Amino acid sequence: LDTNILDIYLLEKSNTRRTRLEELVIVIQSQRNSYHARRGVQRKVEILQQAAELGQLLVDAFSLSAAYGHSASWFFFIEEETRVILAAVLQVLHRYERQEEWFLGKRLHDNDASIIHHYAFSEDPTSFGYPDPAAGWALSALLLRRLAERIQHEHLKSDFTIDWKHEIALYIWEEGNGPKLTAVPEFCTEPRDNCATTFTTYLPDCGDPVSKEDIFVAVKTCQRFHTERVPVVKATWEKDAGYLEYYSDVSDASIPTVSLGVANTDRGHCGKTFAILKQFLSKTAPEADWLLIVDDDTLISLPRLRRLLRCYDPREAVSLGEKYGYSLVRNGYSYTTGGGGMVLSRVAVSRLVSGGCSCYSDDAPDDMVLGRCLTSLRVPITHSPLFHQARPEDYSETLISLREAISFHKHWNIDPVAVYKHWLQDTHPREEL
């Protein structure tokens, strides 16, 4: 992930020999958006307070650089909402020999071969473990140094970053030449006895949800799906929208749809998406703060999205959704996946349109073109794991993000209405604004 990293460097004092230090670098994986930057700083302050209470020597630093490389023993990675009991984390790490290569975390695995993991380990998907970032995960410094050296001289097997936690576990494992993830029971997402970490939520309470009228929903469809996919939207989440338009290649009064004058393409849909951006800024569209662009086979919880958007400032250029990456190691870019839903503030849409961004063809991949344009405009791509490009069954069933999901995508081999009711429909929704 393209995150803004806040680091805390902790050196534990020894009561017997001050020269023998147990060392821990905590990396808070934050993001450049102002809300996430604030949350990262808040988590940092909490950990610093614990360090002071433990009577530890504190050195504050700013990057994973040579300043740490020769003295740190452990690097511990957490999310903004990961709560840490510092003394317990140090106690856990004492169990592992720091002069060996260790990859530690709460173990996730696939129950079935998953498309988002390129069907890896299809014969036995449960055999391969990868870390739950919400619980925190650790690398011994010996392993991290070797990985840092390796990545400087070795091309990654894929240019695409889809699910970084699985991909980093594969990279570390190195087809059996490196360590597999060691499960640590004290790294938790839910509170229980002996936890060194717990997790709060990916759906924080930032106040009352934004109103329905603050979000303009654009559904991309085409004539061939008017009778197949659009009825699913109408049977599930359409009722929760304040403003919603179906954008198609033809006008159909029975839905109704709006024709943008862009011919349908079998893939990409860049021409249609950029026409939607311009339509959103036109005088004929409602003056909403947020634009949500979805596919006609996207399943989404608009009440949960309204809760999440309260955390973000619509006066900023915001691009929000499930973040993928392209060629990140070689100065590539991140982008929000289209199937899970792309959320843009009005400011971000204005910058895209006025900044001269355009499609190189109508069937270019719209989400990637938008990501490249936003990167060139220095608009951060903000990731939320609550958006999902695939179906629920394509993710590890123990992921906490599934329980608070905002979206899923695709109708393949599922009953989409049943999936919506099970995963996305709140039984006791908040009072509507």
Image (cartoon, grey):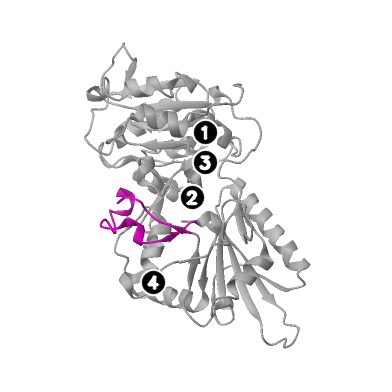
What x and y, as percent, mark residue 171? Answer: 37, 67
Q: Secondary structure at mark 4?
A: helix
Q: Which residue is pictured at 40% across the width and 39% down the height?
A: 340
Tag 3: amino acid? Val
- Identify the image quadrant of residue 418: top left
**Closer to the camera: disc 3 or disc 4?**
4
Q: Which residue is label 4 attached to? A: 151
**Closer to the camera: disc 3 or disc 1?**
1
Q: Residues within 10 Å of mark 2 (few under 14, many from 20)?
A: few
Cβ atoms at labels 2 and 4 below 8 Å apart = no
Which sits earlier in the primary sequence, circle 3 or circle 1?
1
Which sits earlier in the primary sequence, circle 2 or circle 1?
1
Tag 1: amino acid? Leu
Cβ atoms at labels 4 and 1 below 8 Å apart = no
Q: Quadrant of the C terminus?
A: top right
- SS assignment for the magenta stretch, majority: loop
Cβ atoms at labels 3 and 4 below 8 Å apart = no
> CA separation, marks 3 and 1?
14 Å
- Identify the image quadrant of residue 278: top left
Q: Which residue is label 2 attached to? A: 378
Tag 4: amino acid? Ile
Q: Which residue is label 1 attached to? A: 305
Which is more toward the observer, 428 or 116? Answer: 428
Q: Which residue is pictured at 37% across the width and 32% down the height?
A: 298
> CA separation, marks 2 and 3?
11 Å
> CA separation, marks 2 and 1?
24 Å
Which sits earlier in the primary sequence, circle 3 or circle 4?
4
Q: Which residue is label 3 attached to? A: 318
Cβ atoms at labels 2 and 1 below 8 Å apart = no
What x and y, as percent, mark residue 350? Answer: 48, 35
**Range covered by the magenta-colored residues:** 107-132
